[in-house]
Amino acid sequence: MMTFELIILGLFYLLAPAFILWLCIKYVFLDKLGSVLIAYLFGILLGNSGLLPNESHVLQEIIMSISIPLAIPLLLFSSDVKSWVSLAGKSFLSMIIAMAGVVVMVIAGYLLFNAGDPDFWKVGGMLVGVYTGGTPNLASLKLMLNVSESTYLLTHTYDMVLSGLYFLFLLVAGQKVFSWVLPRFKSRKSKADLQSEIKTDNPLAALTNRENRIPLLKMLGLSVLILAVSGGIGQVVPEAIMMVTTILLITSFGILFSLSPKVRQTNHTFDLGMYLILVFSITVSSMVDFRDMLAASPNLVFYISFVVFGSLLFHVLISALFKIDTDTVMATSAALICSPPFVPVVTTSIKNKEVLVPGLTIGIIGYAVGNYLGYLIANLLSTL
């Protein structure tokens, strides 16, 4: 039964994004920082304040498991399917380069930082899984490789912190820095059109406007229906592919309904989806506890850092040779290193909705291959 403290925490997770959006409206410098970055800072402060109740992880898991599946269709309802075809080739190539970068850096890092730990090869396998797929792959590989609880928790904690720093870099400076070596994205739409599609001048006012209330509630209901149907189908497939199947179906239904003019032309569905992304951002960042990091070995920290930032450097440099644009590289990188839920955040930050669906698709492919690739590389490392 949910306690009073958990009810208050749940209300905070649900209402804090409204306060953050209000702050961004009121203060220009906060708007420049971005609502997502502020949400992460809110969550980190909360997670390390000592105020969270002992059972908070249960509520956090529930919110995380619901907010993203509900957000994805809302983010896709206003998509223009016709513009995706021209991005397919570059996006696929970017994915191959990014995955190759993760594998290369995991193997190189293993050789550099393994100080005789007999289970270090298992960490390498988990890193391949989580940085080509996501947390579900990390958890799956823990079971597949029989990783100890302590090693898994430390790896997961450092993954959250370091991939969080990586993600903040993408939001704050990624587009500008990558543009030094990568070509700029060539859009088929005007900058004004993209800006209006992705972000309204006042998303909080748009979401609370009476005229938008009923249409948005209908679209939220449709998103709930999509989640229910996709989750139901996911229950009847083998457990190993349940997550991939569910996310693939949610994304597919979102794309399918975007073909309906009535759905696609409903105003501010993207803003509502982004509100749920803010809920997710605060929740997931509040799970980071810096005190747990003190028990980690330096080699583990160096290894994960090397894989995260080394694979990024590899991805950017090789992409430059193939003239892959900045925005495609950023969406691909966010999908693999941070997982699909972070792709909408990045595409909103760089004001380019056209790479949203390719990024989500790449993330889903990563979920599908992460376990196989992670298991394969782990066994390879065990022989070195």
Image (spheres, helix red, strand yellow):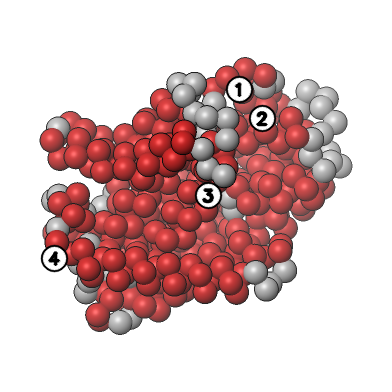
Q: CA distance from mark 3 to mark 4?
A: 31 Å
Find the distance from the CA under tag 2 to the CA under tag 1.
7 Å
Q: Earlier in the sequence, mark 3 or mark 4?
A: 3
**Tag 3 or tag 2, which sits nearer the N-term?**
3
Instruction: Give the CA separation, mark 1 to mark 3.
Output: 24 Å
Decide: is 293 above or below 253: above
Residue on which the image places disc 4 = 211
Residue 154's tag is 2
Please, what secondary structure does the residue beneath circle 4 have? helix
Which quadrant holds residue 85? bottom left
Residue on which disc 1 sits: 293
Nearer the observer, 146 or 107 = 146
Q: Nearer the viewer, mark 1 or mark 4?
A: 4
Q: Amino acid at mark 3?
A: Ile
Sequence order check, earlier mark of 1 and 4: 4
Q: Are marks 1 and 4 in contact (CB under 8 Å)?
A: no
Select label 2 or label 4 by which is in front. Answer: 4
Is disc 2 in contact with disc 1, using a CB cutoff of under 8 Å? yes
Rounded to the nearest whole Å, what is the CA distance between mark 1 and mark 4? 48 Å
Using the numbered discs, state the Cα–Cα distance from disc 2 to disc 3 in whole angstroms: 22 Å
| Type of amino acid under label 4 | Glu
The tag earlier along the polypeptide, 2 or 1, is 2
* Badge 1: residue crowd in 10 Å (few <14, some 14–19, many ≥20): some
